[in-house]
Image (spheres, helix red, strand yellow):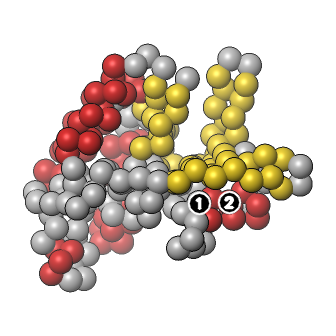
Amino acid sequence: LILLPFCDGHLGSWGTDYGTITRITDEILSRDDLFLASLGDMTQMSIKFRSIMENSDNVVPPEIQQQMHESWLDEVLGRLLWGTFDNHSVMREENATGMSRYASAYKDRCIYHNGIGHIDLTVGSQTYKIASAHFFGGRSYLNPTHGQMRYLRMEGHDREVALAGDSHRPAFATFTEGGRRYIGVNGGTAQTN
């Protein structure tokens, strides 16, 4: 079993490499052993109106971004294990309207975590204790997995793996604390321009 932490697709952004999303989706669908956790920011949702740059980054309106996202969710449905909140869609929609169509799309299709999720993923006789979120508190410009490592050390004591995205900096780190081995993973992005 391969678990792909997939995040930061930013559907609807001018800067997104849609060929990358297509290639990754094709690989997900072509392999029987590949499953994914969607860790947020799959749509751009530049709806905060903080700057001209941000507002002009929507190549298509938010409604079409959500339709693209829901179509993608339906395509990967048999491979999608869980999804999480994010700052581009869920937090922006909930702050503006009190609800999120993005979050509802996940709730209708898979397990959804509107915060940090704890997942016990059993494969054969092995159970992996995973903490999953779009981001964990704590940032470091030197280490994209700092928030994940901090969470495992300070809060998620019963977890052994922490998955997140948000910073667009793919990274993988292992560390030992109290004689236990931990893993922090940070996803990359398709928004490369």
Q: Secondary structure at mark 1?
A: loop
Residue 101 seen in render:
no
Residue 37 seen in render:
yes
Q: Residue furthest front?
A: 142
According to the image, label 2 marks what residue?
149
77 relative to 153 in the view: left or right: left
Q: Amino acid at mark 1?
A: Thr
User: Taking 124 as reference, is 160 above or below it?
Assistant: below
Q: Give the residue at x 11% y 60%.
A: 59
According to the image, label 1 marks what residue?
145
181 relative to 165 in the view: left or right: right
Q: Give the residue at x 35% y 47%.
A: 104
Q: Residue furthest right?
A: 179
Q: Quadrant of the N terminus?
A: top right
58 relative to 26 in the view: left or right: left
Local crowd at mark 1 within 10 Å, few (<14), some, or many (≥20)?
A: many
User: Taking 81 as reference, is 11 above or below it?
Assistant: below
Question: Real-space Cα distance between discs 2 and 1?
Answer: 6 Å
Q: Give the residue at x 47% y 54%.
A: 170
User: Taking 155 as reference, is 78 above or below it?
Assistant: above
Local crowd at mark 2 within 10 Å, few (<14), some, or many (≥20)?
A: many
Q: Quadrant of the C terminus?
A: bottom left
119 relative to 191 in the view: left or right: right
Residue 149 on image: x %, y %: 68, 60
Q: Give the residue at x 39% y 65%.
A: 87
